[in-house]
Amino acid sequence: MNKISLLGLGTDKERILENLMKLGVVEIEDLSENTSADKWGDLVDSDGDQRTVQEIEAHIEGISAIIDYLSPYDTRKKGLFSSKRNISISDYKNILENRGKLLSIVDEINRYDKLLLNLKTEKNKNSNLILSLKPWENASIPFELTSTKTSTVLFGVTPKSSDIYKMEQSLSEEIPECHFEVIGSDKDQHYLLLVYLASEEETLNGILKQYSFQKVSFDGLEGTAKHNIQEAKSRIDSVESEIEEIESKMTSFLGYKDDLEVLHDNMLIERDRKRILENLIKTERVFMLKGWLPENTSEQVKTHMEKNCDCFVDIIEPKNDEEFPVLLVNNDLGKSVESITNMYSLPNSREIDPNTIMAPFFILFFGLMLGDGGYGALMSIFSMLVIKLLKPDESIRRFMKLMFYCGISTMVWGLLFGGWFGIPNIPALWFNPVNDPEMLLSYSLLFGVFHIYAGLAVRAANLIREKKYLDIVFDVLFWYIIFTGFALYLLPYVPKIDVDSVGWLVDIGKYLLIVGAVLLTLTQGRKNKNIFAKLGGGVASLYDLISFMSDILSYSRLLALGLATSVIASIVNQMAAMLGFDNIFKIVLVIAVLLAGHTINFAINALGAYVHSSRLQYIEFFGKFYKGGGTSFEPFKANTKYINLKH
């Protein structure tokens, strides 16, 4: 990365920013804090118009809501993975010429949306009314009739547990003139109608209280329950007709959906161009911006900007100790694992990008842990079909590319191990890990040693970049010596190792272990001030031998997951075979068991392979050299949601 400073006339600001956005390779720093600095405060002001940005964002939210609203009505076939439409600049400009009409359509759709909301609210209101009146449908007395000159009409409910027959008997004995009627019952309560003399109200209330009677009122309703239910149903039919009519009108706006997406992205671009002003500083007639851009684009950007705009551009290299934003540039293999590294942390600007180095190990370990060639073939075929036919966006395309590579790796390991959908007795080109798990464990530990040594090599490369040549000897070479000695010394304890044939290696390991321990003791505490602290720090560093052994044992998960896939696949096959093939029903059942079993086995173990292969990179590999903490390079460019502008 290089630093860029640009001075331009305020009258040319919009054109300068438009050109920078089209180039899309400059990250603009925030200079607004300089307006409060002592040496700048009296000379410059911060730029930007927050109110305008907020107004544009309000428009964006409104248009986005309309697009989302129209989407369910869009019956056009969509791909499994959504991707942006490509649109030429000429078509883009032609659509934006109708900006006023598109905004009026947005207002009209909003108006229809409010109408629909009101209609749906009314429909729900009437539906709820019908539900509440349904138990009272058999009542013949209109709701507005609550009393006469001498009597009172009372609607109410009692719990289902109440004895309404005893209640009726009590009323009959105490108030003979009372009319008692059960309108209906459900699983929760009884619905009752009582007509009684107003003079007997006190006596009546005393009886009703014994049966947990609750009064029900129907304020605002006139006529019987049946009459109100019929009116509500009629109103619902009318509302549904209006809703259908409005929704039909809404579908007529589908033709504008694509244009609205263009307008939405145009406003996103406009919003970003207005928002970036907040990062600039200005005087009455001049403005300034600073930022970062890739070194290999520096001269082109400078030439382009000074040729097409009235501005002065200065490009300088960053200082040796200056951090700058990180832009990863890798081949296809390295790009496929960038998402895995990014989940951990971006590399900082001064260290080596580990992706291209890490990718072969990740793919190797993934294939070994999944280990079934049949699963690998299906994964590779599916990934390639997605890439070729569906043409997904960049992030999904990279993930599918990784799955393609991992599928190829899995197929290779399947050939070596004889693993194909758990089918028994398929000859292995190397050995069958189910029959000889100790052999696989030995090689898993060996792969771990190579992986960790590669991590130390990357540490050495980073130290070369920093020109710390002595540190390469002290912090890499000496660790190679002691780790190698330790590994050789432990050879007799590794499965499938002929102890007698490796005796001479064990002797070499013993000497390397002693030499390495002495060298580390003398050098690892070198940053401490006094001699005792230096020696103490050196002795304490030897504890990393335990960490090394722990790291190596972590690679035994390669054995565990590799065996799990094979064993579960064979169990699925045995379960299916137990059903027999006597008739067509059993054959269909066998196929169903095989499909379900292998799908579940593949899904679980592919996920496990992905997670554990990532873990081996994060802990065992990155732990040897990786600092991370980089800030992603975020250039000022057109960030769109629905379209890609083809310049």
Image: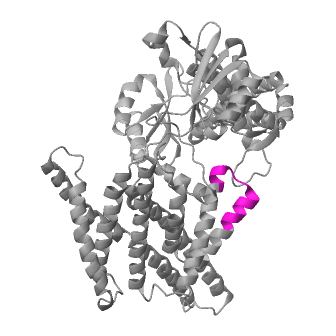
User: In terms of secondary structure, what is the magenta stretch mainly?
Assistant: helix
Quadrant location of the N terminus in the rendered image: top right
Q: Which x, y percent locates residue 621?
A: 41, 60
Please report the residue visible at 71 percent of the width from the left and 12 percent of the height from the top: 11
Residue furthest to the left: 532
Q: Which x, y percent locates residue 224?
A: 63, 32
Please report the residue visible at 61 percent of the width from the left and 83 percent of the height from the top: 590
Q: Is residue 279 above or below residue 414?
A: above
* Tally of numbered discs: 0
> Which of the pair 197/224 is nearer the observer?
224
> Which of the pair 468/646 is nearer the observer?
468
Q: Is residue 202 magenta?
A: no
Residue bounds of the magenta highlight: 382-397
Would residue 490 be visible to someone looking at this image?
no
Q: Is residue 77 above or below residue 30?
A: below
Colouring chosen for the image of the structure:
one colour
Quadrant location of the C terminus in the rendered image: top right
Please report the residue visible at 57 percent of the width from the left and 90 percent of the height from the top: 426
Dividing the picture into quarters, in which one does residue 506 lie? bottom left
Q: Which x, y percent locates residue 190?
A: 47, 43
Dividing the picture into quarters, in which one does residue 586 lie? bottom right
